Amino acid sequence: MITSLRSSHLVAFATAVSLFTALPASGNQIDKQSRNDIPDAASANNAEIMTVTSTGSSTNGQWQKVGEAQLKVLFWDVYLAKLFTPDGDFESASAGIEHPLRLHLTYFLDIEGEKLAEETEKQWRKMDFEHPENADFIEKLSAVFPDLEEQDSLAIETSSKGEARLFHNQELIYEFAPSVQVDQFLAIWLSDRSTRPKLMKQLTGQAQ
């Protein structure tokens, strides 16, 4: 992932969630950099954020790119994250997420879907996100997230009302109703409370 999956991050991407059926991912892992766990790099000493250009537009013309950043942990390139909004602007905040948006993640490691859900829960604990429905949401993420192979992508796209759609390799695999948990998921990447402030600033266009 919702809207936001790694390394330190994901890392992402609603508990009042109307889940459709998650599509299974294929399992070939030949001649690929493979890890079943996500490197933990909560501190700047362990994680390197690659500075990249924060201007441009998305391929479909509907979204304007706000920023992008590549996360590298120790010896591993984990993912490339890109944030899009309709006008190319985004304002981060400690509470709440500005919608609509599209968060796109391209992974450079093989990662199991359950590990992504576990990383989401770990990030929420670090960010002090507490809600009675968090556990149910994490359980649903474990079922929804596909197992990722190198160069696979996950994207979460939200509407102005906070509804979220989850894509795997450009294919829609899940739809979420607006919820606190969708915003908490996106906050891992986009909130001022993110445990990866350099990454957040790159994605939200705050870093020059």
Image: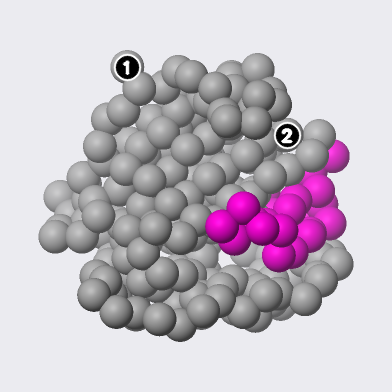
Q: Position of residue 37 (x, y in %)?
A: 33, 76
- Residue 100 is marked as 2
Q: Residue at x 27, y 30 (%)?
A: 51
SS class, disc 2 = loop
Q: Which residue is mark 1?
A: 208
Q: Is residue 28 visible?
A: yes
Residue 182 in magenta stretch: yes
- Which residue is more in the foreground, 71 or 28? 28
Judged from the image, the secondary structure of the residue bearing numbered disc 1 is loop
Callout 2: 10 Å neighbours few (<14), some, many (20+)? some
Q: Give the image location of residue 92, x and y in percent.
A: 55, 30
Which is nearer the eye, 111 or 89?
111
Q: Residue 26's x, y, as percent? A: 51, 79
In the image, residue 204 sits, relative to residue 128, either above or below, namely: above
Quadrant of the rendered image containing residue 144: bottom right
Type of amino acid at the residue the image marks with label 2: Pro
Q: Amino acid at mark 1?
A: Gln
Position of the N terminus, as image quadrant, is: bottom right
Q: Is 2 situated left or right of 25 in this image? A: right
Quadrant containing the C terminus in the rendered view: top left
Residue in the picture at 53% in, 45% down: 104
Q: Which residues are magenta?
A: 161-184
Crowd around label 1: few <14 · some 14–19 · many ≥20 (10 Å): few
Give the residue drawn at x 73%, y 53%: 165
Relative placement, left or right, of 129 versus 189 is: right
Tell me if residue 196 can be seen. no
Q: Position of residue 178 (x, y in %)?
A: 81, 52
Left or right: where 158 falls relative to 168? right
> Does the segment drawn in magenta span residue 41?
no
